[in-house]
Image: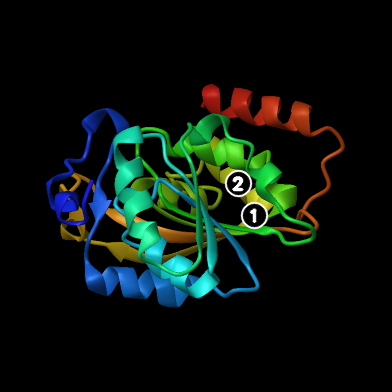
Amino acid sequence: MSLADSAVVRPRKRFGQHFLHDPGIIQRILHTINPRPSQQWVEIGPGLGAITFPILAAAQRLDVVELDRTLIPHLQERAQAEEGELHIHNTDALNFDFAGLRRADQPLHVVGNLPYNIATPLLFHLLSQLPAIADMHFMLQKEVVERLAAGPRQSAYGRLSVMVQYRCRVEPLFTLGAGAFRPPPRVESAFVRLIPYLDPPVHITNEQHFALLVRSAFGQR
């Protein structure tokens, strides 16, 4: 696939794809995450590479996890014209061993435009990988970000709020208009930062029992 062919790559509904293309939003994301060569970066769902190649240029090495094999030739060809090492993992992020990417004592910096249809299970999967992760930055449905950041007695407060806030500091950063994506989604989006705690704010003796209790509590409200 040539670079010119990227203009005719169509987002696939089955993967929930909405490709980021707004230059202003791309620059705002890059300014926010500030990738550096000393860091180890992983992108989930690179799509056509809107933020992939700017991150690669800054960090000089980047791992990307992309399930849609039709996008791989485009990413590979673009990578040949760029400086740095792009490592493509053509697999499902829901089953991927992110911790296995960690090199020496370098924790992972994870970023991605997460498909709305898998965002919640993927967040729970990443919670199981937190010892290897320094921080995470995601484009998500605005409603999901509101759930992540919600506090007690707020209508959006639920299982996702409790389980993520126990493990991470949640920082909603900015919203993204539908026009920033192709095709425009029918929902609003937001960019959020999740920073794993070195020490959780509360001590849980048995995390499996805690997770079951939270699931049961919010399943009966």
The three-letter amino acid code for the residue at tag 2 is Val
Residue 17 appears in the picture as rendered: yes
Res 195 quadrant in image: bottom right
Look at mark 2 in the image and give the residue it sits on.
164
Q: Residue at x 69, y 30 (%)?
A: 211
Res 110 quadrant in image: bottom right
Callout 2 crowding tier (Cα within 10 Å): few <14, some 14–19, many ≥20: some
Q: Secondary structure at mark 1?
A: strand
Q: Residue at x 78, y 59 (%)?
A: 198
Q: Residue at x 59, y 74 (%)?
A: 37
Q: Nearer the viewer, residue 129 or 86?
A: 86
Residue 195 appears in the picture as rendered: no
Callout 1 crowding tier (Cα within 10 Å): few <14, some 14–19, many ≥20: many
The residue sitting at the left extreme is: 8
Q: Nearer the viewer, residue 102 or 198?
A: 102
Residue 22 percent location from the top left of the image: 22, 66
Mark 2 vs mark 1, CA separation in Å: 6 Å
198 with respect to 115 (left or right) = right
Labelled disc at residue 168: 1
Q: Residue at x 60, y 46 (%)?
A: 164
Residue 180 percent location from the top left of the image: 21, 60
Q: Is residue 20 above or below residue 34?
A: above
The three-letter amino acid code for the residue at tag 1 is Cys
Residue 1 percent location from the top left of the image: 23, 46
Residue 190 percent location from the top left of the image: 35, 58
How is the model colour-coded? rainbow
Q: Nearer the viewer, residue 114 or 191?
A: 114
The residue sitting at the right extreme is: 205
Q: Is residue 45 above or below residue 36?
A: above
29 with respect to 215 (left or right) = left
Q: Secondary structure at mark 2?
A: helix
For the residues labelled 2 and 1, say whether their Cβ atoms are less than 8 Å apart.
yes
